[in-house]
Amino acid sequence: MTRNGPSARGATVTFALALLVALLAIASLGVGPVRLSPLTVVQALVGYGDEIQQIIVQQIRLPRAILAVAIGGILGLSGAALQGLLRNPLASPSLFGAPQSAAFGAVLMIALGFADVRSYALPVAGIAMAFVSVFALLAVAGRNASLLLLILAGLAISSLAGAATALVMNLSHNPFATLEIAFWLLGSLEDRSFRHVALALPFIAAGAVLLFSQRAAFRALSLGEETAQSLGVDVARLRLIVIIGTALGVGGAVSVSGTIGFIGLVAPHLVRPLIGHDPARVLLPSALAGAALLLAADIAVRLIPSTTDIKVGVLTSIIGVPFFLYLIVRERRALGGGVA
């Protein structure tokens, strides 16, 4: 009975989160300049009702909702995986520089005039640059590097990518391209189409499969590296798979949405009080919580009255920064630091 308790509770929480994601997805399809009821949304999805409503739901809003679920899901999953790998509740997908590098690749395409925010070249460049960041990380730190070396190398790569992005914007001779880059970097799902879904989704799915495949290793690693190795876990290989999975998934996500921060940090912390601290059980609920968070944020930016569209990355940062500061204070108190 005791053994089945956490498992049953985890299944209940996972089902509740999946239901929440489905409800938010339907709400997302109904929110916009033309408000549609949930019944109208469902009818439009299955091909009934007014033809204009079908176009609005199926061609304009459905790709946006799919990307919100996929991007929020991979961010939440990557955050949970990295926190399990590093055994650090403050870890997030930006730790190894893949999101910043993906953003730099996309920004470079815009600045050079090779692509705009609706072009196929944008996600291709972002994903390619995310892979470059991973290879650079492994080249600098080495395959068997310690976690500290990986974190330091990731910090250096993310800082370099951020500086390179700023340099590209500074050197751009086209003020319209610079403005487009600035707005794109804020993070948005607006005007995304099935072209972006088709290009980003395979990479997001591949990254998710890699991360989920290591759930048993995360459980062993929670007992410590030496114990995990004694149980047959190749820790160096685990790190490599997690980094590549994060680069695949997050690189694909960032390259079609811009920078959307803090979901990977927040989502695992929202589900742990409900299902416990087992890193293997946290993965799927974190992915669902991340999807729900991004869907809710994307709905909110369409409902907040404003003269221009608020970028979803701005809203997630406004919510995420205070949460991050709270986590830092909590960890400091847990370590006995108190308040100065």
Image: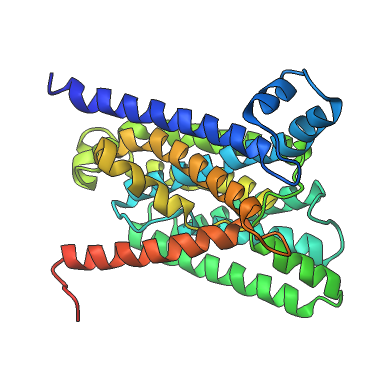
Q: How many marks?
A: 0
Residue toward you, 92 or 141: 92
Q: Position of residue 230 (x, y in %)?
A: 20, 37
Image point (57%, 56%), residue name? 260
Residue 244 appears in the rendering: no
Q: How is the image coloured?
A: rainbow
Image point (54%, 71%), residue name? 159
Image point (35%, 58%), residue name? 90
Residue 10 appears in the rendering: yes
Q: Position of residue 34 (x, y in %)?
A: 76, 41
Q: Position of residue 298 (x, y in %)?
A: 60, 48
Q: Which quarter of the figure is the N terminus placed in?
A: top left
Residue toward you, 57 or 94: 57
Task: From this view, report whether residue 320 is shown above or below residue 58.
Answer: below
Q: Which quarter of the figure is the C terminus placed in?
A: bottom left
Q: Position of residue 271 (x, y in %)?
A: 34, 41
Task: From this view, report whether residue 43 is shown above or below residue 320.
Answer: above
Image point (84%, 56%), residue name? 115
Left or right? Give the position of 137 relative to 223.
right
Residue toward you, 246 or 61: 61
Left or right? Give the position of 288 relative to 160.
left
